[in-house]
Amino acid sequence: MPSSARHAAVFGVSSAIALVSITACGSGSTASTGSADKLQAAPAAQRLTGVCPKTVVVQVDWEPEAEHGPLYHLVGPGHTVDTAKKRVTGPLVIDGKDTGVDIQIRAGGSAIGYQSVPSQMYVDKSITLGTVTTDVAITASAKQPVTAVAALMKKSPQVLMWDPATHPDWKTIADIGKSNEKVVYVDGSTYASLLVAKGLIKKSQLDGSYDGAPARFVSNPGIAQQGFATAEPYIYEHEVSAWKKPIKYQLLADVGFNVYPEALSVRSGELKSLSPCLKKLVPVLQQSAVDFAAEPSATVKLISDLVQQYNTGWVYSEGTGTFAAQQMVKLGILGNEADGSIGSFDMKRVDSILKTFTPLVEQSGAKVEPGLTAEDLATGEFIDTSIGLK
């Protein structure tokens, strides 16, 4: 499955669907190379023993990929891989040192039947944190409320892409809207409604039949298509044999799709009880994001290895992962907020997201919790403002 096929499950509303047939998966667990026996203990400020669960369980919203790099960067040597349940478990390490607890990262997508992360968090209370994009949190607010405690990414990597040879006059998404070409996307994505509401795209241009495969774009390069700045530019130029040339794109974040993608979130009712853990864990997560940005190669290799072991049909090369890690920093997708810290929230922005996306979510048929506030959706209480990219 090409990287772009995740679109129904990531960065959008919670009505995720299976896009392709999934390869039958193996079962059992396999031990990774390396040993945790020689790990040094982390400094006291980063020791999580006694305040966090013995295993910090993180449910992500898709298959292993570089956008989750700061999480996989925490997985230490001696980890095990459960190929049946699509999860990796190992010592939670920071700067190569043991924090005293384990981390378990569970794949999303096919591994959870394409359910939303909030729904999975409320089905399985062993999950400590989930990656939940702000519009998904708004959608889930009435029945499965979650509160974000750290931003995994500063802005969304989602884009609309086009062929520059066919459309040399297209420089922005607004230029697409001046034409009558189709915009091919996954039906149900909230950004499509946003683009129409802002007058950037005509409703008549929308074509919600995108299945994640490159065939349509290759055969009809006149269309615009959704994608990710962290994937499609590399994949189309280097891995799609029928294309092998550059594409152009604009980030949706540049035209008002201002959600915090895949923010690390807890069940709202457990925010208080988890506070002692989060006070120490969130700065560790922030530091892991800084460390991953500086040196992603070992983590990208782990991600690629997990993709192969899980064998779900998801395809993700080391080349794509390396490109993604570089793009995230280059484009400010993984970057500091205005206060200079990584992982933090601009609460005025969260409030703006709430006001922008509540009517769009309600138009989709979801019920938003009455009186929902920005503080319900996110908190910067546990952020260490001294930790950021230099």
Image (spheres, rainbow, N blue to C red):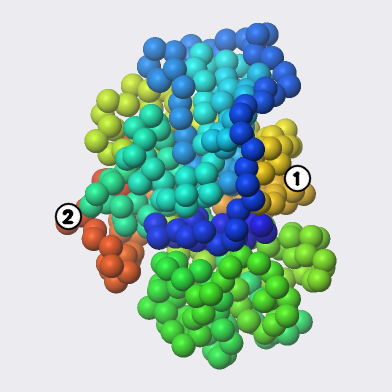
Name the secondary structure under disc 2: loop
Q: Is residue 232 visible?
A: yes
Quadrant of res 74: top right
| Place of residue 213 in the rendered image (x, y in percent of width and height, measured from the top left) | 66, 67
Q: How crowded is mark 1: few (under 14 residues within 10 Å), some or many (20 or more)?
A: some
Residue drawn at the location 63% of the way across and 81% of the way down: 223
Q: Callout 1, which amino acid?
A: Glu
Where residue 211 appears, as percent x and y from the top left, is 58, 68
Give the residue number, with chain letter if any, for mark 2.
371
Q: Is residue 337 visible?
A: no
Q: Residue at x 32, y 57 (%)?
A: 139
x and y percentages locating residue 57 in the rendered image:
46, 30
Tell me what residue is drawn at x 65 percent, y 8 percent: 37
Q: Does 290 appear above or below 260?
A: above
Residue at the limit of the structure toward the left, as seen here? 370
The kind of residue on which mark 2 rests is Gly
Frontmost residue, 128 versus 340:
128
Q: In which quarter of the image is the N terminus?
A: bottom right
Quadrant position of the C terminus in the picture: top right
Nearest the viewer among 121 and 37 is 121
Above/below status of 117 relative to 170? above
Does label 1 or label 2 sit earlier along the sequence? 1
Specify the quadrant of the image occupied by residue 282: top left
Q: Residue 58, how many percent across, how many down?
A: 47, 34
Q: Above or below — where is 377 with respect to 254?
A: above
**Cα separation between marks 1 and 2:** 45 Å
Q: Name the residue under label 1.
A: 318
